[in-house]
Amino acid sequence: MSSTMTLPLWIVVVLAALAIIAVLDRLLVPSVRWALRRRANRAIDKMNTRLSMQIQPFKLTKRQVLIDQLVYDPEVLYAVEQYAKDNKVPREVAVENFCVGPGKNVLEAGEFLVELRFPARPAHSGSHYRRFIPRNEMDIAVVGVGSSVVLGADRATVTAARIALGAVAPTPLLVDEAAEALIGKPISDQTIAQAAAAAQAAARPISDMRGTIEQRRHLTGVLTRRTLQGAIARARGERVNHA
């Protein structure tokens, strides 16, 4: 014999929602899955107080639970932060001070990099990066230069600047002298050339199979000029190619 069982509409809606959550649980990134799964399990717990037949919560293996708790659980993250504060563990390092030599950084035994913090970009600011590589198949820069500028309200004067060089010294270089050649001065080919010359003077390249000292120093000046021009154009709201 068979009989028909009638379910209240709210149960049908909840079951449909849980089915959707189960599908999304497989599609979403881990952090979103963790939050979604916790909310769903709380809803199931509340529902089970009104049902005679219990609905099983979303289950994970012990290993998955441990990974999720360590990485995404707010209580675990809070405990880690408190432990770090109590033991004076955390420290912030400026990006220009992170690398201390070829293949070396400031991390000590037991330390690991937790996050990178990028300040919000101010108005009338722009940045641009370019590099020279031997060929497209070999993704190793002979020289790399990144420039960032902030312009005044008139968009004709540089109020702040940072110029960084890569592959021309044992560590990446933040060249303050190049920035000082720009700050407080009207934008012109002359001031950009002065900044490029300061960047060239700061470079300490070597000769190897990818390029000579002379070539790298020359490229440092060329790329500094081009990245500054691109950063200034972006700060003025102009579109600049990534190339």
Image: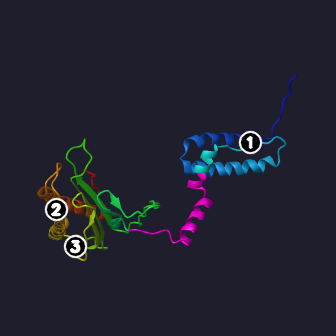
The crowd level at tag 2 (other Cα within 10 Å; few <14, some 14-19, many 20+) is: many
195 up-or-down from 208: above or below: below
- Kindly identify the residue that appears in the image at 67 percent across and 39 percent down: 19
- Sooner in the amino-acid sequence: mark 2 or mark 1: 1
Compared to residue 208, the image places residue 80 above or below, namely below
Q: Name the N-terminal-most of marks 3 and 2.
A: 3
**Type of the residue with mark 2:** Gly
Q: Residue under circle 2? A: 221
Q: How far across and down, in percent of the image, does residue 243 sit?
A: 25, 51
Vertically, is 112 above or below 30? below
Quadrant of the rendered image containing residue 127? bottom left
Q: Tags 3 and 2 in contact by the CB under 8 Å rule?
A: no
Can you give x and y, in whole percent of width and height, for residue 86 in the image?
56, 72
Q: Is residue 78 magenta?
A: yes
Locate residue 200: give its quadrant.
bottom left
Residue 30: image tag:
none
| Image quadrant assignment for residue 156 | bottom left
Q: Give the image location of residue 98, x and y in percent.
A: 36, 64
Rendered view: 155 above or below 61: below
Sequence-wise first label, 1 or 3: 1
The residue that label 1 is drawn on is 56
Q: How is the image coloured?
A: rainbow
In percent of width and height, residue 240 lies at 27, 55
Please rate how many residues cluster around mark 1, counting C-alpha atoms within 10 Å: few if below 14, some from 14 to 19, many from 20.
few
**Magenta residues, start to end:** 68-93
Residue type highlighted by circle 1: Gln
Residue at screen point 16% across, 70% down = 194
Name the residue at 21% across, 62% down: 224
The residues bearing labels 2 and 1 have C-alpha atoms spaced at a distance of 66 Å
